[in-house]
Image: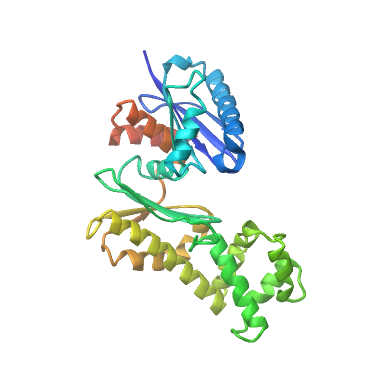
Amino acid sequence: MNRYVIGVDGGGTKTELVLLDCSGNVIGEAKAGCTNYQVIGGNKLKDEILKSLSSLIASTNVSINRISFVFLGLAGAGRESDRKEIAALFNDTEFASKIIVDSDAIIALAGAFGTAPGIIIIAGTGAICFGKNSRGEIFRSGGWGYLLGDEGSGFFIGRKAIIAALKDFDGRGEKMKLRTELERHFNLSSIDQIIPPIYQNKVNRVAIADLAPIVFAQANQGDHIAEEIIRRTGRELGILAKAVSQQLNFNNEEIKVALIGSIFKQKDMLLNEISKELYEISWNIEICEPMFTPQYGAALMALQKSGIEINEAFLKNLQSITNQS
């Protein structure tokens, strides 16, 4: 009798699910809403997950008793205590013995390299880095939130840009085209008018992170300050990866680094600084695209839990299937 697993990538805005059989064939996919434990709490998370699982299973005609594991990779589940609380939510359901919970970053790492060793840098509104070595050890760097970290993130870029524009305004910094572009973006006659909306949280961290494309565009057009912000961004992302490389003892070994997140839409402007930092650890650097999206990483981890070997042939088969979809 064929067995199945379900991988779930649960985020703050959407959740994506995939159902695989033990040969790596994609049987079905589904989507749901927010399943960030810290945002919606346990009861809503449980309801959303159960609803989405029921929908996926019904659409594929797969019996629940043939599902070995459901691997939930969830935003807001970074701490062991949170993961235990989330798993316990399903103790009174028919999935009780099947649920595995971990963070969304762990499944992104598994998806990027097909569960093999490597490092992922995730940079969107925030920024974090995770890596795994051949011994299965996992380490992280960054991801401490916009108040205490997130260097190299969209918020980091946007905040640096606003600070530079304010320095231009009051004579402490260089004159720059970037200031004009920020004033136009916020429909301001002068950049100092941005202060009240920021401190009143009318311009929040997401709105500040959304300034990143403007800064990249100005850097492309030769704005000196924008160029320096982007160089600093790449350097900070490289430092994240370097710290993880050191923790993983990747000295003088091949280091595979996958880039994930909206900031890397402009990755060509960041690669030089990222690589400079990593070259201090090893000259053998491969920066690559993720092999699979995170929900597939969750499913692969569920298959490993089931005792299935994730070898090269298995991954090639799954890649051929996902590339067709």
Which residue appears at 74% of the width and 73% of the height? 193
Q: Based on the displayed image, in which of its 4 quarters is residue 318 positioned?
A: top left
Q: Residue furthest top?
A: 1
Residue 7 locus on image (x, y percent): 45, 32
**Residue 285 located left or right of residue 93:** left
Instruction: Measuring from the top left, give residue 148's x and y in whole percent.
Output: 51, 62
- Location of residue 307 with respect to 271 vertically, above or below: above
Tell me the quarter of the picture where residue 272 sits: bottom left
Q: Position of residue 123 (x, y in %)?
A: 49, 56
Q: Depth check: 187 or 285 in front? A: 187
Any part of residue 295 in sight: no
The answer to whether residue 248 is above or below residue 66 is: below
Residue 120 placement, left or right of 196: left
In this view, the residue farthest toward the left is: 252
In the depicted structure, whether residue 248 falls above or below residue 95: below
Residue 162 appears in the figure: yes
Task: Tell me the colour scheme of the image.
Answer: rainbow
For residue 225, side relative to residue 270 (left or right): right
Q: Residue at x 36, y 32 (%)?
A: 317
Q: Percent position (x, y) of residue 156?
A: 54, 65
Question: Residue at the spot x=30%, y=27% of the render?
Answer: 308
Q: 271 or 148, which is in the foreground?
A: 148
Report the number of numbered marks.
Answer: 0
Front residue (pair 64, 219) = 64
For the N terminus, the quadrant is top left
Residue 191 versus residue 25 in the image, above or below: below
Could you tell me which residue is drawn at 51 percent across and 20 percent down? Answer: 92
